[in-house]
Each structure stands twice: as C-alpha cells, then as structure tokens.
Image (spheres, rainbow, N blue to C red):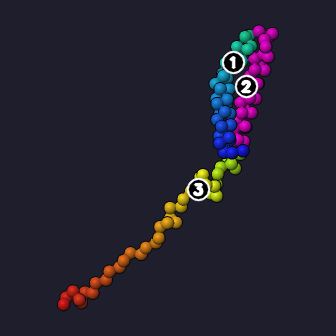
Amino acid sequence: MSYTAFLILILIVAVALILIVMVQNPKGGGLSSSFGGGGAQSLGGVQNTNKFLDNTTWTLAIAMFALILLANFAIPREGDNNFKLDNTLDGIEATTPVQTTTDTNDSLK
C-alpha cells in the first residue's frame, strides 16, 4: 500500500471518529436518548446504544493508531527519488582562513 492510501484512510477514520465522539453526550443523552426515548420498548435501548457508540469509538481509535504505525513503514525513504533529502554540507568544501603575517622589522625600515 502506498503512503497516499494510508493518509486517505487515516483521514477517513479521523472524520468518522470526530462524528462518533460528537454524537455522544457524556450524560447519557445525545443519539442514545433519541433511540431510547425513555421507553422500555425502544429500538436497541439506551444502554445498547451507549455501548455501541463506546465500542465504535474504541475501534476507530485503535484503527487510527494502527494506520499511523503502518503508514510509518510506507513513508518513502532516502533511496526513493520522491523524497530525497539533500545534505547541505556535502557540497561545501572546508576552507581555511588565509593568514597574513607581517614582519614588524620590515615595517620599520
């Protein structure tokens, strides 16, 4: 898989994770309250919806972590032509400063 594909997958998982976290309400409301509605005969129930959202959050977070680690192996390295880093010190030659000596005896004559 190429590095670009990993970046696209990471972005998709990040957006999904943001949406899932925004849907949740820390006090038991949010999406779970609309499914629950306060009745016992609701679709899935409040606890099942909270459990689903919690499990989805953890799954997406683990998937994001795994994708980031795998993307590290897909990063183009030094041998690739796309991302070759130039070492700026390779082309610079070391020069020694020119030392000038003056003879103090010659200047008096």
Three-letter code for the amino acid on which mark 3 is drawn:
Lys
Is 19 covered by the magenta stretch? no
Where is residue 94? Give x, y as percent.
Answer: 46, 72
- Answer with the quarter of the image where residue 9 lies: top right
Q: Label 3: which residue?
A: 84
86 to 59, vertically: above or below:
below
> Could you tell me which secondary element the residue under label 2 belongs to?
helix
Quarter holding the N terminus is top right
Three-letter code for the amino acid on which mark 1 is drawn:
Leu
Tell me which segment is drawn in magenta: 39-67
31 to 74, vertically: above or below:
above
Question: Left of 53 or right of it: where is 82?
Answer: left
Q: Are marks 2 and 1 in contact (CB under 8 Å)?
A: yes
Residue sitting at x 65%, y 37%: 8
Three-letter code for the amino acid on which mark 2 is drawn:
Leu
- Answer with the quarter of the image where residue 64 lies: top right
Circle on res. 31:
1
Residue sitting at x 79%, y 13%: 43
Q: Label 2: which residue?
A: 53
Circle on res. 73:
none
Report the front residue among 5 and 19.
Answer: 5
